[in-house]
């Protein structure tokens, strides 16, 4: 049985396993450009009323935030449990130090409805199913206008082995999960990024508006 089964997932991401993940996700020019193209599509429905601020939950080294900076002037916040990744965010001036938060999706140290857009990208898949409702609840609480999830999709919940570890990757219909939790959300748009065409992973995204 994998060692990940014997320690909390959060400890895994804070430690050497999370450091290795950070090392693999260098914010090079090609990676940022792929994300720029992704964000142009995702934000298209919001052109008439774009967000003025955003929080990335699980920002790692900030590839998404770096891409967003090239498209919009946003007040940016980053939530990240891994200290090495937080240091890079500050060192590279992606986000001001006082807006780089040490935390997890189920505990966000921000006030209710304090950020226009709250989003994840490849993060909810790493939240254990028993903690997913709490994580989405915190994101919903902090979001003022929009909630966005960019994740792997499965029509039925399933767990996958991740880099030889168990208990670290879970897929489901995250959009439907959030709609069931929060009937006040209105779907704005959704879509799919196909890896052979985009260079990203095969990612499904859901964009919701709050009333």
Image (tube, rainbow, N blue to C red):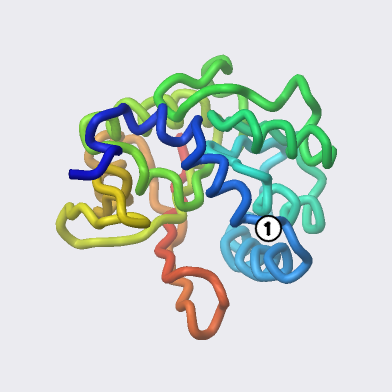
Marks counted in the figure total 1
Q: Nearer the viewer, residue 210 or 91?
A: 91
Q: Residue at x 63, y 61 (%)?
A: 39
Horizontal side of 89 relative to 125 (left or right) equals right
Q: Residue at x 32, y 51 (%)?
A: 175
Q: Return the x and y of residue 126 as percentages of the image width and height.
A: 36, 44
The N terminus sits in image quarter: top left
Q: Is residue 4 above or below residue 150?
A: above
Q: Nearer the viewer, residue 203 or 114?
A: 203
Q: Residues within 10 Å of mark 1 (few under 14, many from 20)?
A: few
Q: Residue at x 36, y 60 (%)?
A: 152
Q: Is residue 60 above or below residue 182?
A: below
The residue indicated by pointer 1 is 47
Horizontal side of 139 relative to 75 (left or right) equals left
Q: Residue at x 26, y 56 (%)?
A: 161
Q: Return the x and y of residue 168 as percentages of the image width and height.
A: 32, 44
The quadrant where residue 181 appears: top left
Q: Return the x and y of residue 21 as percentages of the image width and height.
A: 53, 49
Horizontal side of 69 relative to 105 (left or right) equals right
Q: Nearer the viewer, residue 4 or 205?
A: 4
Q: Return the x and y of residue 160 as percentages of the image width and height.
A: 24, 57
Q: Is residue 111 above or below residue 133?
A: above
| Secondary structure under the numbered disc 1 in the rendered image | loop
């Amino acid at each position: 049985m994998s060692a990940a089964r014997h320690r909390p997932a959060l400890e895994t991401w804070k430690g050497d396993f999370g450091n290795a993940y950070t090392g693999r996700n260098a914010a090079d020019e090609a990676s940022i450009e792929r994300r720029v193209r992704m964000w142009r599509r995702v934000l298209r429905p919001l052109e008439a009323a774009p967000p003025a601020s955003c929080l990335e939950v699980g920002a790692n080294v900030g590839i998404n935030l770096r891409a967003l900076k090239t498209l919009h002037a946003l007040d940016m916040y980053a939530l990240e449990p891994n200290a090495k990744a937080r240091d890079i965010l500050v060192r590279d001036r992606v986000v001001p130090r006082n807006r780089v938060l040490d935390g997890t999706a189920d505990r966000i140290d921000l006030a209710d409805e304090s950020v226009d857009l709250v989003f994840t990208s490849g993060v909810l898949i790493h939240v254990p199913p028993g903690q997913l409702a709490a994580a989405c609840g915190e994101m919903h609480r902090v979001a003022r206008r929009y909630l966005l999830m960019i994740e792997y999709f499965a029509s039925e919940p399933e767990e996958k082995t991740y880099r030889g570890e168990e208990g670290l990757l879970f897929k489901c219909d995250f959009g439907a999960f959030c709609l069931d939790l929060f009937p006040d959300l209105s779907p704005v748009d959704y879509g799919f990024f196909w890896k052979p065409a985009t260079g990203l992973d095969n990612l499904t995204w859901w964009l919701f508006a709050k009333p």
